[in-house]
Amino acid sequence: MSRNNRTCTDCKRAPQMQCLHCSNYVCMDCAQKHVASVNNQINVAQHLFNTKIHLLDQLRENSKKGLDKEYEKMIKQLITERDRCEREIDHLIETEKQQIAQNSKTLLDIPLNEVPAYIDQLSTKLSKLNEKTDFVKIASVPGQLQIRK
């Protein structure tokens, strides 16, 4: 197609220049409108980009607030679980202490000829109980926070 067969993309008159932005041919009258139109499109796109960047900042802030909320909830659950476990340990220890106290009372109440065998039986059981004994086993499953997109 020769230059003479081309027309302005806006008004169909003979073009006097080619737009460097989009390579369309435009006449002098339409050139300024064309540039203004392209600038407007750029401004609209830039506004959209800025809006989305701002939105992403807000989403980050909201996500972190949500994370903090879940973290606090987990901390409360852990405190509740720790308190429950402490009560359970207290109960187990008190039960063991009561059994030992009962054994002591039984020792005083049994016939003298049964005392040595009773003491041997209790000594074996009580020798397993010392400072290094894991009276209770404590295990945990680490709390998990999951982030998914």
Image: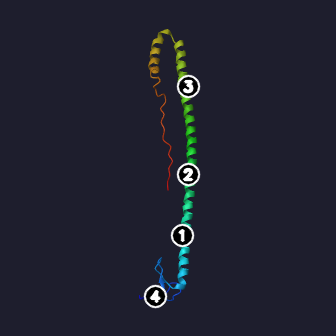
Q: Along the polypeptide, which appears first: circle 2 or circle 3?
A: 2
Q: Which residue is most to the bottom?
A: 4
Q: Position of residue 92 (x, y in %)?
A: 53, 28
Classed neighbour count for the residue bearing mark 1: other residues with Cα under 10 Å, few (<14), some (14–19), many (≥20): few
Query: Disc 1 marks which amino acid?
Result: Ala
Q: CA distance from mark 2 to mark 3?
A: 44 Å
Q: Position of residue 52 (x, y in %)?
A: 55, 63
Q: CA distance from mark 4 to mark 3?
A: 100 Å
Query: Disc 2 marks which amino acid?
Result: Lys
Classed neighbour count for the residue bearing mark 3: other residues with Cα under 10 Å, few (<14), some (14–19), many (≥20): few
Query: Disc 3 marks which amino acid?
Result: Glu
Please say if the residues under marks 3 and 1 sit with CB atoms less than 8 Å apart.
no
Instruction: Identify which residue is drawn at 54% across, 69% down.
Output: 45
Q: Which mark is residue 6?
A: 4
Q: Nearer the viewer, mark 1 or mark 2?
A: 1
Which quadrant would residue 76 be assigned to in this image? Answer: top right
Q: CA distance from mark 3 to mark 1?
A: 72 Å
Which residue is identified by label 1? Answer: 45
Q: Position of residue 100 (x, y in %)?
A: 52, 20
Of helix, strand and loop, which one carries label 1? Answer: helix
Q: Along the polypeptide, which appears first: circle 4 or circle 3?
A: 4
Q: Which mark is residue 29?
A: none
Q: Which residue is most to the top?
A: 112
Q: Position of residue 62 (x, y in %)?
A: 58, 54
Quadrant housing the N terminus: bottom left
Q: CA distance from mark 2 to mark 4?
A: 58 Å
Q: Nearer the viewer, residue 119 or 69?
A: 69
Q: Which mark is residue 64?
A: 2
Tell me the colour scheme of the image: rainbow
Q: Along the polypeptide, which appears first: circle 2 or circle 4?
A: 4
Instruction: Identify which residue is drawn at 53% across, 21% down.
Output: 99
The answer to whether residue 86 is above or below residue 101 is below
